[in-house]
Image (cartoon, coloured by chain):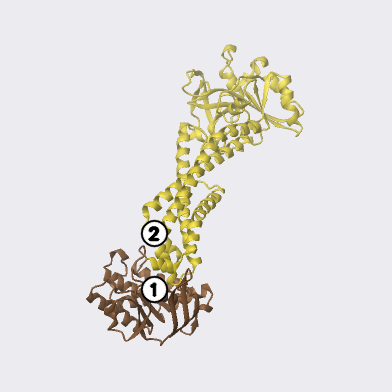
Chain colours: A yellow, B brown
Amino acid sequence: MNLATVSLAYLRARALSTALNVLLLALGIATITLLLLATSQLEERMQRDARGIDLVVGAKGSPMQIILSSIYQLDVPTGNVSWKQAQELARHRMVKKVIPLALADNYRGHRIVGTNHDYVAHYNARLAQGRLWQAPLEAVLGAEIAAQTGLAMGATFVGAHGMGAGEGEGVMHETHSYRVVGVLAPTGTVVDRVVLTDVASVWAVHADQYDIKDVARVAELMPDDEKELTALLIQYASPLAVAMLPRYINQNSAMQAASPAYETARLFTIIGVGVDVLRAFALVLIIAAGLSVFIALYNALLERRYDLAVMRTLGASPGKLMALMLFEGALLAGIGAALGLALGHVLTEALGYAFKAAKQVAVTGWTWHNSEIWLIVLALAVGVVAALLPAWRAYRTDIAGTLARG
Amino acid sequence: MFELRELRHAYDSADVLSVAAWQVEQGSQWLVLGPSGSGKTTLLHILAGILKPTAGRISIAGQDLTALRPAELDRFRGQRIGIVLQRLHLVPSLTVMNNLSLAQYLAGLPQDGARVREVLTSLDVAGKAGAYPHELSFGQAQRVAVARAVVNRPKLLLTDEPTSNLDDARCAQAYGLLESQARACGATLVIATHDQRIKARMSNHYELKAQP
């Protein structure tokens, strides 16, 4: 027998009202938990994908589109850039490293990315099986691709033209088939979702008009003027480049520079509006829950005024009655918060499952975000605040007056 | 024992109770009689320490109640005074067992399950320990209310109109319970009532007069 036993007994005695209050609070907390987990994971994942990339250079067009298409492999590219211009840029003194990207085809909706070994190294991807590509038309699969397509080491496949399946441009490149020479271990980055190969592979597949028989020598045989890339991932050699390089590129070349940091921040501002609306909605739910808890406790107080007076006659101090009401509010809120967090995690996992089917960014509910502690604090605070006035009334219970009326 | 001296209580400057002096031996049993409005309930509340008299002194078991700080008074009340109210007022969401444990807990005493069972057994309601108040008959509820009042072995057992709505047989039964339980824990028993049926059973009467 203690405050908890008494509070629990009272909550049980009003099971319906208790359930309603817990549910209201749980829905609010679950919504915020879902937003918190989903946006933080999305943000973290996007930041991880863009980490170490100072600038992306692509064909003239929308900077956002360049970032989405070349870092996140989500949107279609803005066009192609000439290989010669790319070579010139790579020699610029403010450029430390350039990772070339050549995008043109997909395999069953998974992008085939022509690049060099620096791309693999940049994302710290390790081989789970086999080796990296050494020649054109050798392919290395990202971990998710390997799992989803079931392609094994040594398997061959052909790419379809275009950036994704079902876009009406799926012309198969039957004449050139890729061979799987390696599979990467999971990295938790964009690398997991692409098929990697040499830049020259992409040239070879699209160089039919040059009638190149020796695919291994496509880079030598193809005229430099005809070679094209889709985008360049650039690392700056000096902090000064931030101010100078993008402007230099935009003014002196047919290429467009896009800053991942700026564009992703912009993207999150756009997404943020929706997130804010949902968050406001969740807060309204929580406030409604707080009001509902208040009304429930206040009614309980009126119902219980004789109980409270009797407890005083049994030796309870006014402080103890106050503590009883506050504890009941906190208990209600605590149960609501626990249920809400659990619900939020399950919903996030369900959302992640739905996303997975759409081959979008993976989100899981089986993770903990430190801000969730603040959600618990918020819920408890709502419970305690809602209980304040009833607690004060309980504190002020006039024993003799109440009993005399009874 | 308890002692009242020059006790006076007023609501809105109209006296509702005045007791010049009243001294009672420990363990004795008293009936407080008086017409409606003579202040029986007020006197009982003052004795229980839940109402502070406008003037006068009151001491119970050697303790001057007016000298106690509020927290001490609460504790004193929980440990030394048992109260049975006319409407019983068991806590409806707690079982019989827990209603008695609550009395021990709120009085700041160790929770003694053996004592709870002992009291319930002596009042012949041990079989209802797990029942909720709404599952009890009136007679059972009354026994539980008495059990809750005596579970902490009070020095003073106060009851307000315990028999007014009962038929003769039940009236006798209720009085018997109070009388025997008070005796069992050596408590002074004070029954406030206007029920004339009890008058014959008790020798010590204290008459309150209607206030002008």
Q: What is the tally of numbered marks visible in this picture? A: 2
Residue in view at x 32 percent, y 86 percent: B203
Residue wearing tag 2: A303
Residue type at mark 1? Thr
Q: Specify the quadrant of the image occupied by residue A86.
A: top right
**Residue A400 percent coordinates (x, y):** 43, 69
Task: Give the CA separation, mark 1 to mark 2.
Answer: 23 Å
Dot 2: what SS? helix
Q: In this view of the protein, which residue sits in the foreground, B73 or A28?
A: B73
**Which chain does tag 2 point to?**
A
* The furthest residue to the bottom: B25
Residue in view at x 51 percent, y 75 percent: B72
Q: In this view of the protein, which residue sits in the foreground, A287 or B139?
A: B139
Q: In this view of the protein, which residue sits in the foreground, B17 or A385?
A: B17
Residue in view at x 45 percent, y 38 percent: A353
* Viewer can see residue A57: yes
Residue in view at x 42 percent, y 48 percent: A23
Residue wearing tag 1: B41
**Residue B110 percent coordinates (x, y):** 44, 75
Is B65 on the left or on the right of A20, as rendered?
Answer: right
* Viewer can see residue A1: no
Q: In this view of the protein, which residue sits in the foreground, A254 or A105?
A: A254
Report the quarter where the C terminus of chain A lies: bottom left
- Give the class, few, some or many, for how many residues have Cα within 10 Å of label 1's Cα (few <14, many ≥20): many
Is B72 on the left or on the right of B191, as rendered?
Answer: right
**Residue A354 percent coordinates (x, y):** 45, 35
**Vertical relation: A87 (above or below) B178:** above
